[in-house]
Structures are given as structure tokens and as C-alpha cells.
């Protein structure tokens, strides 16, 4: 008899689902992001637009949901899946930089639950939650794509 | 730093290995959590982090990636373009502990008259333990 955990139909139904949201990039956001990563002043283009650090799209990774909608540990709503795991930690990231992001850009974010993989580690069962996020500017040009894997465990 | 919209010819650095040392503190973790709207308590609530088995609040995966991006950008110079960056967290990092963000060129090739460099990356903690492994692809125009 197989006692290994499996994914519920509810989780399987979520895989492939996508959420779309849109943000306007401000110079203020870019400067704060640069300061948060310990960078110096961000570059300024000839037209006065502030050019964002390469991983700036991380600023738009998580949706603006109110705190009471988050799991009790405050982890991102995007990772709040009906699986028997309560602890979450960031695992890995593959980030493609496809174009520059500048102040006054309007970025469309498409976040998709790409997969949930069950692994059996030394500390028990791990659930690898894979989220693909694509970022496109107001001209319809792709500026970044990230595939991030989060680790959830009991 | 970061990517640029200009197309001036970039100078390929002579060094084939590079390092950036950073010491994230709680203020930096707070600031990065705020700008990325990441309210996961393991990053700012020490009691919660300890209840989950960590000795302190945990440096965000995303912030570690930015440290690697800064290391690559500092080596490559302002006109080079980071096209791809990947990293995998192997163990947690904690505030007020210096991290050595290291890189080394692993391959060089040409594409449309431009040079591309592949770099292997790693982050090492003060105990010499590997916090993250990664890779970057950088284009010199």
C-alpha cells in the first residue's frame, strides 16, 4: 500500500492557473529598491527616466493583498496552497533579464503556478512550489521572466 | 550597477574572478521586505523565526540574488548587460554576518559580434559554508 503523500485534485486544478495584475513604476520605487539591495544611486537615462536594477521586477512578485488574507506566518498568498505544509522558505530562482525597466513604465505581471513537486527529504516531506512570473511593459515588450521555486514543509 | 539603455562599447574586465562582501542587517531585511511587499514573518519577527527552528530572522532569497547581481555588475562594469541570473539557496543566511559573494568566468563565446561570459557564482558565509550557488550570463556589447 502506497503511503506516500500525493497532491489533491484541488492542488492539481490550481497548477497552470494564472493571475494578471498591473503596476506603474515610479522613480520612487526604483530608488527605494536600489537602497534596499545596498546599491548606489540607480542610473538615470538621457530622458530623465530612472533605470531599475536588474532584479527590480521582484518588487512586483507578490500581490497587494491585505494582511488578514495572508497565512498566519505571513508568507505570500501565492503560496497558500491546500497542502499539508505550514513552513515556507525561498528555494531557487531563474531570472531572465529581457529588457530595461524604467520609471513611468507600466508593467503587466502574469504569475502562474507552474508546478508542485513532492520530495522526500531527511527532514520529511517537502513540497516544491514552482511559480513562473512574466513581466511585460506598456509596449507589450517582455522585460523579465522568473521561475522561482519555494520550499514548503510541515 | 544594473542594466543600461545606452549602447556604448563595453570593456571586458581582465579579472576572471571577483568578489563582493556584504553584511546584511535587520534594517536591510526590513527595507527589502517592504519594497517587495514580502510580509513573511521569518524575515522580520525573530521569535517567529526561532519558533520555526532558525537562530534568527532569515535573509530573503530575493535579496541574496540581488547581492549576486551586484557582484556581477561591479565586475562587469556599467555598460555590460546581465542577461540571466540564477541562484539556489543551500542554507539560510542571517543578519550581521558577512557574506562573500563570489564569481568566476566559466565560459566565453561570441554572438552577433558581441562577447558573452558565463559565470559561476556562490555565496559563502563566515564559517565557510555555502549559502547559495548560482550562475550568470553577461553580454559585453
Image: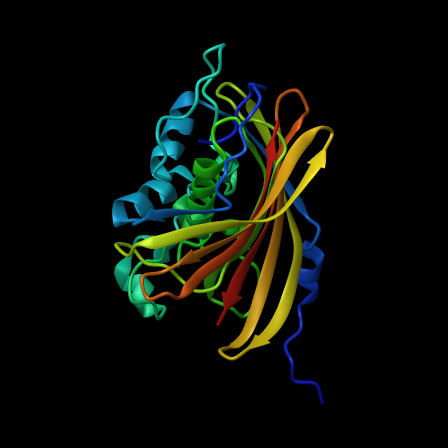
Colour mapping: rainbow
Residue positioned most to the right: B112
Residue reaching furthest front? B14
Residue at the outermost bottom position: A1
Residue A120 in picture, x, y percent from top left? 59, 76
* x and y percentages locating residue B118 in the rendered image: 61, 46
Q: Is residue A110 visible?
A: no
Left or right of residue A52: residue B53: left
**With respect to residue A88, does B8 lie above or below?**
above
Name which residue lies at 68% across and 24% down.
Answer: A140
Query: At x 61% / y 55%, what residue is drawn?
Result: A130
Residue A79 vertical placement versus A139 (above, below): below
Please tell me how many numbered marks the rendered image carries.
0
Decide which of A88, A86 is in the foreground and name it.
Answer: A88
Where, by quadrant of the figure, is residue B46 drawn? bottom left
Question: Residue A22 placed where, x, y %?
Answer: 57, 30
Q: Is residue A138 left or right of residue B20?
A: right
Q: Residue A115: where, in percent of width, then height?
A: 67, 57
Q: Nearer the viewer, residue A41 or A23?
A: A41
The structure residue drawn at horizontal position 29% and vertical position 67%, both measured from the top left corner, is: B55
Query: Which residue is more in the foreground, A19 or A117?
Result: A117
Figure check: B93 above or below B80: below
In this orientation, which residue lies closer to the viewer: A37 or A116? A37
Answer yes or no: is residue A36 visible: yes
For the N terminus of chain A, the quadrant is bottom right
Amino acid at each position: 500500500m502506497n503511503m506516500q503523500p500525493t497532491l489533491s485534485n484541488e492542488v492539481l486544478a490550481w497548477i497552470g492557473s494564472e493571475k494578471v495584475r498591473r503596476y506603474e513604476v515610479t522613480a520612487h520605487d526604483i530608488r527605494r529598491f536600489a537602497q534596499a539591495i545596498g546599491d548606489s544611486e540607480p542610473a538615470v537615462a538621457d530622458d530623465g527616466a530612472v533605470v531599475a536594477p536588474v532584479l527590480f521586477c521582484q518588487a512586483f512578485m507578490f500581490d497587494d493583498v491585505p494582511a488578514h488574507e495572508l497565512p498566519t506566518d505571513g508568507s505570500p498568498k501565492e503560496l497558500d496552497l491546500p497542502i499539508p505544509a505550514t513552513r515556507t522558505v525561498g528555494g531557487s530562482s531563474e531570472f531572465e533579464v529581457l529588457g530595461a525597466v524604467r520609471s513611468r513604465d507600466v508593467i503587466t505581471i502574469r504569475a502562474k503556478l507552474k508546478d508542485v513537486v513532492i520530495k522526500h527529504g531527511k527532514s520529511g516531506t517537502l513540497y516544491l512550489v514552482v511559480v513562473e512570473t512574466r513581466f511585460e511593459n506598456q509596449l507589450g515588450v517582455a522585460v523579465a521572466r522568473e521561475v522561482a521555486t519555494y520550499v514548503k514543509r510541515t | 550597477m544594473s542594466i543600461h539603455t545606452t549602447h556604448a562599447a563595453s570593456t571586458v574586465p581582465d579579472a576572471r574572478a571577483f568578489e563582493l562582501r556584504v553584511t546584511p542587517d535587520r534594517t536591510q531585511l526590513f527595507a527589502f521586505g517592504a519594497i517587495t511587499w514580502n510580509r513573511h514573518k521569518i524575515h522580520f519577527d525573530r521569535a517567529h523565526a526561532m519558533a520555526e527552528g532558525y537562530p534568527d530572522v532569515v535573509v530573503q532569497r530575493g535579496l541574496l540574488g540581488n547581492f549576486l547581481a551586484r557582484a556581477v555588475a561591479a565586475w562587469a562594469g556599467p555598460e555590460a548587460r546581465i542577461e540571466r541570473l540564477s541562484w539556489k539557496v543551500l542554507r539560510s543566511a542571517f543578519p550581521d554576518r558577512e557574506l562573500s559573494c563570489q564569481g568566476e568566468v566559466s565560459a566565453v563565446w561570441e554572438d552577433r559580434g558581441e562577447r558573452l561570459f558565463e559565470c559561476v557564482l556562490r555565496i559563502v558565509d563566515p564559517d565557510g559554508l555555502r549559502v547559495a550557488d548560482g550562475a550568470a550570463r553577461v553580454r559585453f556589447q
